[in-house]
Structure formats: structure tokens, C-alpha cells
Amino acid sequence: MSVLPVAKIASAALAASAALSAGHATATAGPRVELTFRVIDRAGQQVSPLDLQLLNIAAGTNIDLGSGTRRQVRPGRYNVAAWIGTGSGPQSFTLDDQIVNVTRNQTITLDARLGRRVRVGLSAPGAVQEGLELAPIVQGNWAFNPSVIADSEAGGTKTVPAYVVPMAARSVTLYVYSVWEKAGNTVSDPSPFRYDIVNVYRGGIPAHPIFPVRRSDLARVSVTVRATDQDQQATLLLSPMTNSGPPLPLNAGTTLGATPARLTCYRSPGYQWQPIVDLTTPSGEISDNVLNMNAYGRGHFTEQYFGAVLAPQAFQLSAGVTTRRMAVSINGSPFGDPFHPGDTDESQGGTALMSLYSGSKLLAKSHLDVFGGNLNARVPMTEHMYSLQLDATRGPSATVSTQLQADWHFLAHGTTGGFSFNGQLYTAQLIPAGLDLRNQAAAGALTPVTLRLNGTASSSNPVLLNIVRAQASADDGETWHPVSVRRSGDHYVFSVRDPRQAGFVSLRVYVRDGAGNSELLTVIRAYGVR
């Protein structure tokens, strides 16, 4: 099945939901009553629910009974949501959601036979519905954490029937999320298109859950994923989030196949889709978590991922001092995607070591993990120049940005009175123009490279510095030759004459401000030459 189950997303919403469940389990003592749940499937058989959850509406806390049918609770007003399967497989799913005033011991019946079939009407040639999720939200809180409804039979090319039991309640909003792709697509033959459709019904659960959709009402997004490794496969995970509403427990992933990859997406406008693009090879993995992307309206948009040069990006570095304690961190992978600076990147399969020096004295060192790394050291009150060094290597299947070395020099001093000091660590972002989808330039071409500089102790706007130099190498850094750098608005540009035979170009830049804060960045095999 090409619609992938979500196994890697770690959103704040999921963490919050878990915290609510845990918090409710330790509720303060008080009078309790027992609830018994009688669950009936669409065939009329009494069954255990696939999942049953209670939401204390006043407290906003959740109790997940799983397949249980009894629970003692404190009196109050509860939302009861049950996920009911019918038949083996199951052959259908039903969501029964009720709001109940609990004052005494009682039995609550949840009957799937009352359900009405959910239908999302999309007229798109060749598209079949491959995933469906139903999420009732009660006063901004999750009433239920849904599972993806997908059919494992017939190659996973359609969803099994899903039903909802109608109810009216002003506090309940139902979100219906459906995913459509080409019938019969596989990893080796992925769908060239994908539809992500969110329908919203406010005021309960509709008696007629039919949601017509027109493609002209959707945002069209052209997705391109470049190749960075040999034998590389790409997946895309989307999680619709509203700009101002509650976090939604909805997400669905799909395979994009081998890189380079293209996909034409059609998405409901008005949502932040929080794309996560994951690239895997036999020797490693790299992910781009773009969790701060603006919502799309109607129209045509583009998304690009994993362009050269993979290197530390803006907002990934920090060096702060409070009293005499210095804390230095690199957030995420050192091989960040320059197409999405400031977002979270993760990588596995390589090695990375960060070291902190004062002169020639080593203060601390640490290997980076998939989420980055941190260093702590005791420093004097007087101002000194410190050096943060990073040595990182990608896995053996990597074709571009195979190695990098970075050396940041920055001034720092101790503080008093509860104040802190932030050292100035610059990040040099390199974006060669004219590369193909394998991050390669044509042999003998003149490749223009954009160089943008950001600093941790400055605003998020690019900065201009006193000294900016660049070098290029066609032999993996054995020899270097300087290139001329010129200013262009708020950034810099330089051009590299690429070798006349297939191979790679390595890049090195050195930047420094008037106070002596600097970065020396070297990227081996920054981009390829075909």
C-alpha cells in the first residue's frame, strides 16, 4: 500500500495528547461512578471496540480505554468516542461519538448500525481514495486519535467503508481527511499525483456525511526532491494544521520512489501542511522537517527539497553564556537543506564531532546524534575568543556534501546579575544555480553560487561582513583556487568554472566581522559535474 502509516512524526500535538492522558490517570480523589459500554457492530454483534476514548470536557483531559468497556470516572460531562470494526479485516469502520452527562452508574450503548457512510466525492481521472481519517474535536481538544483507514487487499488501492453515527452538538467539529492517488502504485511505480483533502463539519456529526470536492478549489503544489545519494528512496509525510485552530491528529505519508522524484499535489487551501521529506539509502537517512511553512491559498505553488549545498543553516547554531557556564548547541543535522533554512533536519548513517576550544585548550567535545549535539564548559568572566569546530561525514552512499569541516571563532565572556551573553556564530548558506535534479552542473559550465550569511546574535535577516572570501576545488580539496566574490543586495555571489570532465566541485568560504567573529566552512563534493 502506497499510503504509508505514520511512524516517525513527533509533533507537539501528539506529545500534548499523551501528557493529557497521563495527567488524567492521576486525577484527584473524589466520588466515582462506573460506566459500562455496550458496543455493537454493523452486523448486530456485541463486540469490543477497536478503541474507546473518554474526554472530560470541562478539564480537557482524555482517558483511552483501548478495547476496554468499563471505567470508573468522576461525575461530569464527557465526550465518548468509539472506533468500531465490523467483520474480519475489518471490512468496515464506524465512529460513534456521543456527549454524555455522567451522574451515576450507567450503561452507554454505541451502535455502529446507526452509522451513515462517509463519502468524499472527487472527480479526478485515475485517482482512488487510499486513505481516510476521521477526527472529532471537542472545544479544541482531541476526542479521538484516529487510525488511517486503508484497505490492505487489492494492493491497497482503496479505503474500506467508513461510517459515522450522526449527532448534534455545538462543541463538536468533525474533520474528515482523505488521500487520493493513482490506482495500483508501488515503490517502483509511484503515483505522479496526490490529493490531500480536508473537509470540516461544525456542530456535531452530519446526518449526510457526503463531501463533494472540486479540483479547482484546491491548491496545486509541484513537489521536486533532488537526489543526494545513490540508491535513494524518498517519502513524503503531510500533516494538515490550521493557522489558529486546534492541533489536528491527522497525517498521511506516501512513497515518492527513487530520487530524483517529482509529485503534483492538490491540497485543501488554508492549512499548514508541515511536510516531512525523508530520504533513505542502505547506508543512511536524511530528513527535512518543514514545520513552519505558510498556508497555501488557491493557486499554483512549488516545493523543492535537498538542493546543494548541504551544510549548517541559519538558526541551527547557538553559543550562550550565563554567569560562567557556556552552552553551545547544533540543532539537527549539520547537513541542512538550504532550500529550507531554519527548519529541522535530521540525518543518520554518518559521523559528526563538535569540539569547543579556548586557544589550543580543548574545553569539551561531543558526537552529534540524529537531533544534533550540545556542549557545556566553564569560562572566565573576561572576554576571550573561542573556537567551535565541526567535522562531519555522510554515509558511503552519499554523492554530494560528502564531508564538511567548519570552524567558528567567536568572542564570549561571563555574566553577572542574571544576564546572559550570546556569541556571534555566522552560518554561510551556499546555493549553486543551474544544477539538475541530481545536484549536478554541466561540464565546463560557469556555475553562479549565492552566498547568504546569517548570525545567531543578529536578526533573522542576512548580514554583510567585512571579509568574505571563497575558494573552489576540482580534486576533493587537494588543491584550491580563489574565486572573486561580489556583493549583490543583501547577499554575495561568486562563479565557479566547472571542470570539463565529470566529477565534483568542493567549496570553501571564509567570513569575518570587524570584531573577529568568523566562520571557515569547507564542503567536499559540494555539487556534482556531469
Image: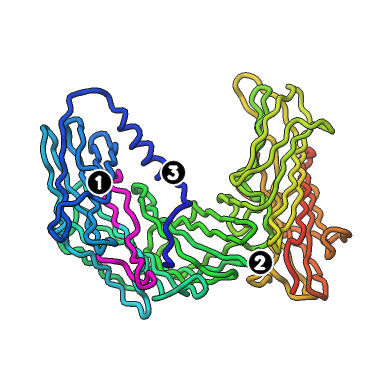
Q: CA distance from mark 3 to mark 2?
A: 33 Å
The mark that comes first in sequence, 3 or 2, is 3
Residue shown at 80%/50% (left/top)? 510
Q: Tell me if 40 is positioned left or right of 518 in this view.
A: left
Question: Which mark, residue 221?
Answer: none
> Mark 3 = which residue?
12
Residue type for callout 2: Gln
Query: What is the secondary structure assignment of the residue under circle 3?
Result: helix
Residue shown at 34%/36% (left/top)? 20
Res 91 → quadrant: bottom left
Query: What is the secondary structure assignment of the residue under circle 1?
Result: strand
Q: Which segment is the magenta one?
A: 134-161
Q: Quadrant of the C terminus?
A: bottom right
> Mark 1 = which residue?
52
Res 75 → quadrant: top left
Whole-percent x and y of residue 514? 79, 41
Residue 167 visible in the picture: no
Could you classify mark 1 by the number of other residues whose Cα lies within 10 Å: few (under 14), some (14-19), or many (20 or more)?
Answer: many
Residue type for callout 3: Ala
Whole-percent x and y of residue 499? 82, 71
Towards the viewer: 53 or 13: 53
Q: Give yes or no for residue 108 being in the magenta stretch.
A: no
Whole-percent x and y of residue 419? 61, 24
Q: Quadrant of the N terminus?
A: bottom left
Front of the two marks 3 and 2: 2
The mark that comes first in sequence, 3 or 1, is 3
> Mark 2 = which residue?
230
Whole-percent x and y of residue 323? 65, 22
Q: CA distance from mark 2 to mark 1?
A: 45 Å
